[in-house]
Amino acid sequence: MEKNKKLIVANWKMNPQTAEEALRLVKNIAGRAARGVELAIAPPFVYLDMVKKNCGREIKLAAQNVHWEERGAFTGEISAPMLKNIGCDYVIIGHSERRYKMGETGEMINLKIKSALRHGLVPILAVGEREKNGDIKKTLAEQLTGALEGVGASEIGRLVIAYEPVWAIGTGVSDTPDHALSAALLIRKIAGGIYGKELTENLPVLYGGSVSGKNTGEFIGQKGIDGALVGGASLEAENFEAVLASAVSGDAE
Ligand code: PEP
């Protein structure tokens, strides 16, 4: 992640339906990386190459998933060396849609993190509680310790964490900036318990969950929140432009 910038990641999920629409979207976004903001697009695998070729140099490329093995008999999977080779910088790992809809386990997430790091990709590790009043401390501790098992102290500085309360994803009901900030502090505290405060006090933590042009600035304007993971609002150029405008207005600190 670039120093002194807030990271905005556009997670297109399984959208759009055609390469033409994807090309239109990327052309509308290209050139919009704003001052103080690092921008990354996470399209479906089939559009990665096209997005890379059309997004301009200042926009980074992210994958939405990765397999933990490098090659071989894993029909339907994509490996970290393949993603690196096609020009990816980041890979989202452990998104709740993969955990709860695709049955991804903590062990798989851990293997994916280690493979991404081995091959020079920056993992964006998504964590978050499922229920609004769920046990956030227990959930974050379990998800983080599981995902980071065997990840060395020299590597923790290469990770980005995304705090994504599952109840806020795709619902139009976002978290409050204060609660998201306390979750970001908790994440750094849990990581600090493993690696020590010195290595984790600046661990980048993004917020994700119904981010829009109306609220992005309120989240990322806070010193302890380093950016946003944006789903629905990244699928229309106008909405995404509003997210970026809000990000710039909130990035006052
Ligand atoms: C996401 O899927 O990571 C996400 C944050 O989605 P949305 O912005 O649509 O809530």
Image (cartoon, grey):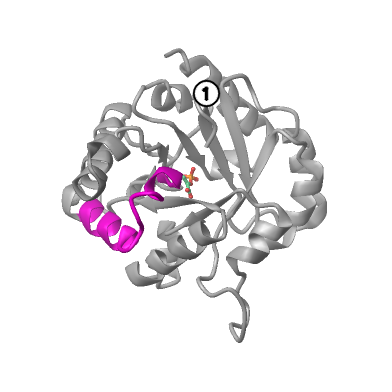
Image x and y of residue 31, in percent: 75, 29
Any part of residue 218 in sight: yes
Image x and y of residue 247, in percent: 52, 23
- Depth check: give the residue in front, 46 or 175: 46
Q: Quadrant of residue 248?
A: top right
Q: Does residue 34 show up magenta in the picture?
A: no
The quarter of the picture where the C terminus appears is top left
- Depth check: give the residue in front, 195 or 80: 195
The residue sitting at 79% across, 56% down in the picture is 19
Image x and y of residue 232, in percent: 55, 44
Q: Does residue 146 show up magenta in the picture?
A: yes
Taking the view exactly as shown, the residue that stands out farthest to the top is: 252
Query: Height in image: 98 above or below 23?
Result: below
Q: Which residue in the protein does label 1 denote?
A: 247
Find the magenta span and give its range: 139-161
The residue sitting at 42% across, 20% down in the picture is 221
